[in-house]
Image: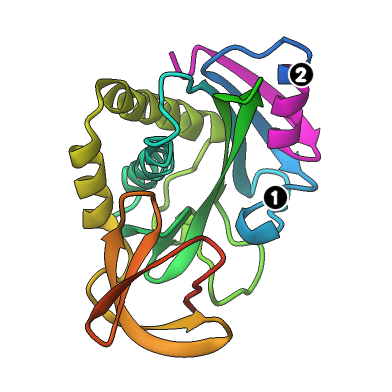
């Protein structure tokens, strides 16, 4: 069960790195949550960094055994995790929280959280995933593209409280994965997908084109309609400004 054990750290380079180290030493069980008050070398999608000052961000990692998922269905893990993070944040603030494909979470078109999932292999088979989550609790910089929970609530946010909420919601999503509720997961993701069916600019092969985000295809890629035709794009093949 996710959230059966919490490990609290004052400072670490990366909670994902720390989780991987414990995993290599045989000291990591399914559902363990690693939390750090300060993270000095965190990593995000596309090679971006995710640093955190003490107490100003939620930085944590969860190890999940995923051997029950087939390789063909493994991309649903990304959707399930994003849904859990989105709902966790939505429970604390009133503005709509959206998911920007593949693993960013936005409020008012500004990034409030990021997710990095690192697949764990053994003898050529997927056995688990390290799920890294970063949530802005307080604004650390003047970046116009980011926001924080503190901007939308006067409630004092405790990282352990957020972690417990996230663990409960992740467990619910994992149960849906175990039961094979693929259509329900995809429909929920589509309902929360940032800028879905809205005319938007996208950068494709260093050129900007206008089109519509239509959803996710059968392998987890983004469907983007250009000139009336749906095209499928992987992680590094399309980008949006926000």
**Is residue 95 visible to us here?**
no
Residue 35, quarter of picture: top right
Q: Assign a secondary structure to mark 1.
A: loop
The reply, left or right, for residue 145 in relation to residue 194 is: right
Q: Is 204 in the magenta?
A: no
Q: Position of residue 193 (x, y in %)?
A: 30, 60
Using the image, determine if residue 172 lies above or below residue 183.
Answer: above
Q: Is 14 in the magenta?
A: yes
The reply, left or right, for residue 5 in relation to residue 191 is: right
Residue 206, quarter of picture: bottom right
Q: Can you identify the residue that label 1 sits on?
A: 43
Q: Counting residues from the N terminus, which is met first, the one under dot 1 or under dot 2?
A: 2
Residue at (36% x, 88% y) in the render? 210
The reply, left or right, for residue 211 in relation to residue 51 is: left
Q: Assign a secondary structure to mark 2.
A: helix
Q: Can you identify the residue that label 2 sits on?
A: 24
Q: Nearer the viewer, residue 106 or 184?
A: 184
Q: Residues within 10 Å of mark 1 (few under 14, many from 20)?
A: many
Residue at (42% x, 52% y) in the render? 154
Residue 178, quarter of picture: top left
Q: Position of residue 235 (x, y in %)?
A: 52, 60
Q: Find out whether the residues at labels 1 and 2 contact each other: C-beta distance under 8 Å.
A: no
Range drawn in magenta:
1-22
- Using the numbered discs, state the Cα–Cα distance from disc 1 to disc 2 in whole angstroms: 19 Å
């Amino acid at each position: 069960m996710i959230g059966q054990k919490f490990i609290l750290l004052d400072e670490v380079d990366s909670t994902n790195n720390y989780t991987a180290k414990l995993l290599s030493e045989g000291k990591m069980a399914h559902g363990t949550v690693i939390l750090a008050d300060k993270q000095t070398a965190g990593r995000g999608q596309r090679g971006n960094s995710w640093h955190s000052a003490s107490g100003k961000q939620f930085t944590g990692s969860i190890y999940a055994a995923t051997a029950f998922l087939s390789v063909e269905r493994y991309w649903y893990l990304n959707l399930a995790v994003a849904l859990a993070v989105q709902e966790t944040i939505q429970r604390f603030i009133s503005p709509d929280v959206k998911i920007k494909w593949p693993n960013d979470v936005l409020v008012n078109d500004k990034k409030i959280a990021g997710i990095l999932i690192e697949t764990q292999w053994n003898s050529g088979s997927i056995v688990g995933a390290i799920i890294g989550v970063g949530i802005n609790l307080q604004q650390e910089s003047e970046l116009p593209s980011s926001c924080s929970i503190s901007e939308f609530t006067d409630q004092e946010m405790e990282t352990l409280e957020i972690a417990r909420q996230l663990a409960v919601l992740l467990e619910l999503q994992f149960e849906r994965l175990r039961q094979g509720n693929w259509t329900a997961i995809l429909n929920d993701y589509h309902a929360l997908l940032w800028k879905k069916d809205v005319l938007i600019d996208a950068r494709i092969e260093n050129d900007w084109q206008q089109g519509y985000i239509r959803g996710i295809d059968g392998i987890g890629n983004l469907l983007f309609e250009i000139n009336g035709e749906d095209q499928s794009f992987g992680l590094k093949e399309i980008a949006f400004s926000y």
